[in-house]
Image: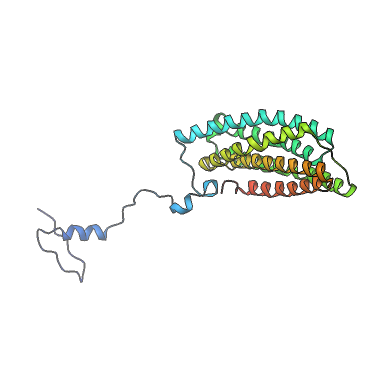
Amino acid sequence: MAENVAPTVGQPRPPRGSTAGINLLASAGPAVPGPATSGCADAACTDGCCGSTRPVRDQAWLRASRIVRALSWFSLAWMTAEGALGLLAGVSAGSISLVGWALGSVIEGLASVIVVWRFTGRRTLSDSAEQRAQRGVAVSFFLLAPYLAVRAGHDLWSGHVSTFSTLGVVVTASSVVLMPILGRAKKRLGRQLHSTATAGEGAQNLMCAAQAAAVLIGLGIVSLFGWTFIDPVVGLALAGWAIFEGRRAWRGEQCC
């Protein structure tokens, strides 16, 4: 025998045979929890590693991480050769911006080592490894800035004169061509992977290209017009840029 359900006081009794009573009971009962949501609107979840959501680590994500590791290995090899040749050319020419650029290549190599470490083995899927790599890349920016500022300030005050270097022109020109390609690729992959460390390394590659272009322009101006102040001014500007990028990397803003 079907059990009669008394309606709530003030509510009309549903007619027999209708489904209104069932609907009434369903609406009066406790709510059934639906599937969990991220609580993040689509617009807020598209900010790369600045977003609050964790990336979906599927096959595409893993493939991108392998590409990043390969690019960082390539960058490390390139920076080693570039740094050695640039340092030789800078010392020979007495150019602070060229020497600073060569030392910047060494520090960029350090950033490449950090990213390779980040995406090797079990660390590939580790959030804590990403955070440590992010801070390591930020520190690599901070290592470059004081050297550039002190040497540039000294040369600006003393009136030190740099000379033209053919080797310096060849090495820096190659970086003007290659580094933007690497930098843009790593910035894009950094957004895909939600990896500030990767995007920070890409920013260093772009900084290397800009620095190489500035060195080329500075060497040309010194050679043509004898304006010796250009070289240390370039060094000071690059020191400021290094601090700016280091702060962004430390706060995790590189892939925004």
Residue at the outermost front position: 224
Specify whether 16 is left or right of 206: left
Q: Nearer the viewer, residue 93 or 198?
A: 93
**Image check: 139 left or right of 11?**
right
Q: Residue at x 52, y 35 (%)?
A: 125
Residue placed at 90% from the left, 47% from the top?
158
Residue 201, given in percent of the width and then of the height, sits at 63, 39
Q: Report x, y in % for residue 60.
A: 46, 35
Quadrant of the rendered image containing residue 123: top right
- Locate residue 28, reporting x and y percent: 26, 61
* Residue 29 visible at all: yes
Closer to us: 175 or 38: 175
**Residue at image point 67% right, 47% down:** 245
Q: Residue at the spot x=20%, y=58% of the render?
A: 23
Instruction: List the single residue furthest toward the bottom.
Output: 10
**Coloration mode:** rainbow
Residue 5 lies left or right of residue 143; in this view the side is left
- 8 shown above or below 49: below
Number of marks in the image? 0
Location of residue 196 (image quadrant): top right
**Residue 39 shows in this picture:** no
Looking at this view, is 33 or 48 the one in front? 48
Going by the image, does 43 lie left or right of 78? left
Q: Position of residue 70 (x, y in %)?
A: 57, 29
